[in-house]
Image: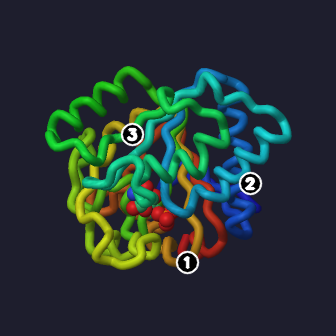
């Protein structure tokens, strides 16, 4: 494992390259646990996807071993598929409950996510923006789409965006179809936290693993800051750490 700072290209991004997925997850867990032990009332911005699962397993193991207390933590999630109720196995609300919240003892009333069943889209976006305003995030975890998206902010989303409804890129529908029994079941629309809101978090931690993320990692770190690669906006954040395994870092 080694650290790299691209002083010229990315003034602020702290980059940690690990041998593999397990090491990436372990390093991320150290940072997340420290955030909560230093501030038990922390507001955590959390992400779904397969990338954070190793981190989440480690948080659960750490709580079992060391008793890290999550009872006062509040969480806000990035995004939710439109049309899926929170009881649906593919909804992100369900994913969070099953893979993290129940095991960490985080009460449902301390968690926040967009309501995929909301029929008034504008009202739901406004409600979520108000929630984000009330709960300034101490920490924001992000995965990375293979097309450079963060949350569900697909290429060409304005950097000034707040919570909004997106039509998912075909490549995202394809990437995410592995978690559904068939591609036709993947919702085509979603609610997502916007890029401006993501950038408001005090500290950001991005995880990426595997060769299929290598182009997006390169663009995020070394490319120009452009709306065509949403993650590149993170170069402008004052406290952003990226933990990537060797495969994802292979083009840096
Ligand atoms: C999804 C999520 C993102 C996630 C990305 C990568 O589209 N909305 O928040 O970061 O995909 O997913 P994975 O970690 O499974 O590669």
Residue 171 in the image, given as x and y percentages of width and height: 32, 75
Residue at 31 percent across and 42 percent down: it is 115
Circle 2: is it few (<14), some (14-19), or many (20+) Cα within 10 Å?
Answer: some
Residue indicated by mark 3: 113
Choose the circle earlier in sequence order: 2 or 1: 2
Does the beta carbon at disc 1 come under 8 Å from ligand 1? no
Specify the farthest residue to the right.
65
Residue 139 in the image, given as x and y percentages of width and height: 54, 35
Residue 54 in the image, given as x and y percentages of width and height: 67, 58
Residue 79 in the image, given as x and y percentages of width and height: 36, 48
Mark 2 and mark 1: Cα distance apart in space: 19 Å
Circle 3: is it few (<14), some (14-19), or many (20+) Cα within 10 Å?
Answer: many
Callout 2: helix, strand or loop? helix
Residue 167 in view? yes
Residue at 44 percent across and 42 percent down: it is 77
Residue 211 numbered tag: 1
Q: State which quadrant residue 250 falls in.
A: bottom right
Callout 3: helix, strand or loop? loop
Q: Is residue 36 left or right of residue 129?
A: right
Circle 1: is it few (<14), some (14-19), or many (20+) Cα within 10 Å?
Answer: some
Q: Which mark is nearer the camera, 2 or 1?
A: 2
Residue 26 numbered tag: 2
Q: Which mark is nearer the camera, 2 or 3?
A: 3
Mark 3 and mark 1: Cα distance apart in space: 30 Å
Choose the circle earlier in sequence order: 3 or 1: 3
Contact (Cβ within 8 Å) of mark 2 with mark 3: no
In the image, residue 112 above or below residue 189 = above
Q: Quadrant of ligand 1?
A: bottom left
């Amino acid at each position: 494992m080694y650290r790299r700072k691209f002083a010229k290209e990315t003034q602020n991004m702290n980059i940690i390259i690990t041998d593999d997925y397990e090491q990436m997850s372990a390093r991320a867990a150290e940072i997340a646990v420290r955030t909560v032990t230093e501030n038990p009332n922390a507001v955590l911005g959390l992400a779904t996807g397969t990338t954070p699962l190793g981190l989440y397993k480690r948080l659960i193991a750490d709580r079992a071993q060391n008793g890290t207390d999550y009872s006062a933590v509040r969480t806000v999630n990035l995004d939710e598929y439109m049309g899926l109720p929170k009881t649906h196995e593919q909804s992100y609300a369900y994913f969070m409950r099953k893979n993290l919240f129940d095991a960490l003892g985080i009460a449902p009333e301390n968690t926040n996510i967009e309501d995929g069943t909301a029929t008034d889209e504008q009202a739901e976006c406004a409600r979520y923006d108000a929630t984000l305003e009330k709960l300034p995030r101490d920490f924001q975890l992000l995965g990375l789409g293979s097309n450079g998206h963060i949350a569900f902010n697909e290429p060409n989303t304005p950097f000034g965006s707040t919570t909004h409804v997106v039509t998912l890129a075909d490549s995202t529908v394809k990437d995410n179809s592995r978690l559904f029994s068939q591609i036709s079941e993947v919702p085509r629309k979603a609610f997502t936290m916007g890029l401006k809101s993501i950038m408001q978090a005090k500290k950001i931690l991005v995880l990426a693993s595997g060769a299929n993320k290598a182009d997006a990692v390169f663009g995020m770190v070394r490319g120009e800051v452009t709306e065509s690669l949403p993650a590149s906006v993170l170069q402008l954040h004052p406290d952003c750490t990226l933990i990537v395994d060797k495969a994802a870092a292979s083009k840096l």
